[in-house]
Image (tube, helix red, strand yellow):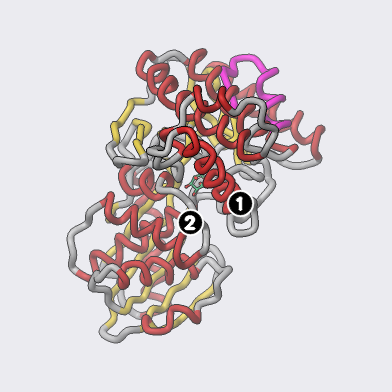
Amino acid sequence: MAQPLNAEINKFKSFLEGLFYQRWGSMPLVTAASPGRVNLIGEYTDFNLGFVLPMALDREIYVAGSPRNDRVLRVYSADYSEQFEFNLAELNKVPPKSWVAYVAAVYSALMSEGYNVTGADLIVQGNLPQGTGLSSSAALELAVARVAAAHGGWAWDAPAMALIGQMAENRYIGVQCGIMDQFAVAVGTPRSALFLDCRSLNYESVPVNFEEATFVIVNSGVTRQLHTSGYNERRKECDQALKMVQTLAPQAASLRDATFEHVEHFKAESAIWYKRLRHVVSENQRVQDAVKALRKGSAPEFGALMLESHRSLAEDFQVSCPELDILVRIASELDGVHGSRLTGAGFGGCAIHLVDRSQLDSFASKIALKYNRATGLNAQVIPVEPGKPARLI
Ligand code: GLA
């Protein structure tokens, strides 16, 4: 899909304004747009304070809102046709497994950090597939924060708001995620991927312009939720790996400080933590190599790193699933495909592929057909371009 045209964004905006007027009898004060993200490479390195290379997407979530002069939040989702109403003093009463929990979690995090928040009427809608590893939750969190900032009258500080989004997940949703998703959504820059150092939060925009190839996402159709997947368990296993590394290097503060020498030292280990260690150390290196390949515009080099990343995620970190492995295998047998890997947390969701533009049509039809034959599932092919960060529209 091309960069979302302003016309497309305006269409969403007018639709939400119309809906807002219909439900609540006035026009919204502001509307925010917030992109999903796809991670090009660097999986499970963020909470180990290493490197990641995500890209904000041209698929977004939109939130229209007006402040209220009481402490009530009324939130309607046009996607779910569902409305919730609660008081800011009773955010813990919000249904924990529902989409609205993310709205409440952002308000809770903002209040705990002392931001001035007002009651509000909000309407949410998006064109970003949910539960597929494209960060629909981070997109919703940052859109809500953007609207809350406008209502509360404080300046928008994108990195600080990314940390609020992460806090919302860690403290209130119960997912011990790292900073990648929220940072990519809050800070992502047009036409570029974001090379982020998750320890210092220093980042660089790296233009995505392979001469012949482009990224294509394929949704496996297997949905998962992070709080029910093995995500938090992986985080604990990484903590265990860190303890082992610290027996050799007591100064190591995170797995970011682990080296290939440490991997080599423990190579006789058959323990789970060793495999996790090997993935994290090698994935951090792959991100740095991938940035070089991207700067050179070398699709073959970038693609080879994607394949290696998938192998490591499937075998060492064990967060793939049969359907994602099948997608990657089928893709690598098709013409014009430089590389493929699962993207995001895994356990289902999407794979990302680097495909020659000249082969895009045949890639889309062949992968859908072969995947359906192999699994009985319908793959959804989603060509993507880099998008814009969370903002008012
Ligand atoms: C999810 C989390 C991120 C990151 C990825 C895996 O998307 O929200 O913080 O850990 O999984 O790379």
Residue 147 sits inside the magenta stretch: no
| One can see residue 360 in this view | no
Residue 244 — which label?
Answer: none
> Disc 1 designates what residue?
233
> Viewed as shown, does residue 23 lie left or right of 273?
left
Q: Give the residue type at disc 1.
A: Glu
Identify the secondary structure beneath mark 2.
helix
Q: Residue 272, image x and y in percent?
A: 66, 39
Q: Residue 95, image x and y in percent?
A: 55, 75
Mark 2 sits near ligand 1, with its Cβ under 8 Å away: yes
Crowding at mark 2 (Cα within 10 Å: few <14, some 14-19, many 20+)? many
Residue drawn at point x = 55 percent, y = 40 percent: 241
> Viewed as shown, does residue 391 lie left or right of 2?
left
Q: Magenta stretch?
A: 325-340
Q: Give the residue type at disc 2.
A: Ser
Image quarter of the C terminus:
bottom left
Q: Earlier in the sequence, mark 2 or mark 1?
A: 2
Crowding at mark 1 (Cα within 10 Å: few <14, some 14-19, many 20+)? few
> Disc 2 designates what residue?
137
Residue 331 sits inside the magenta stretch: yes
Give 221 or 251, whichever is nearer the viewer.
Answer: 251
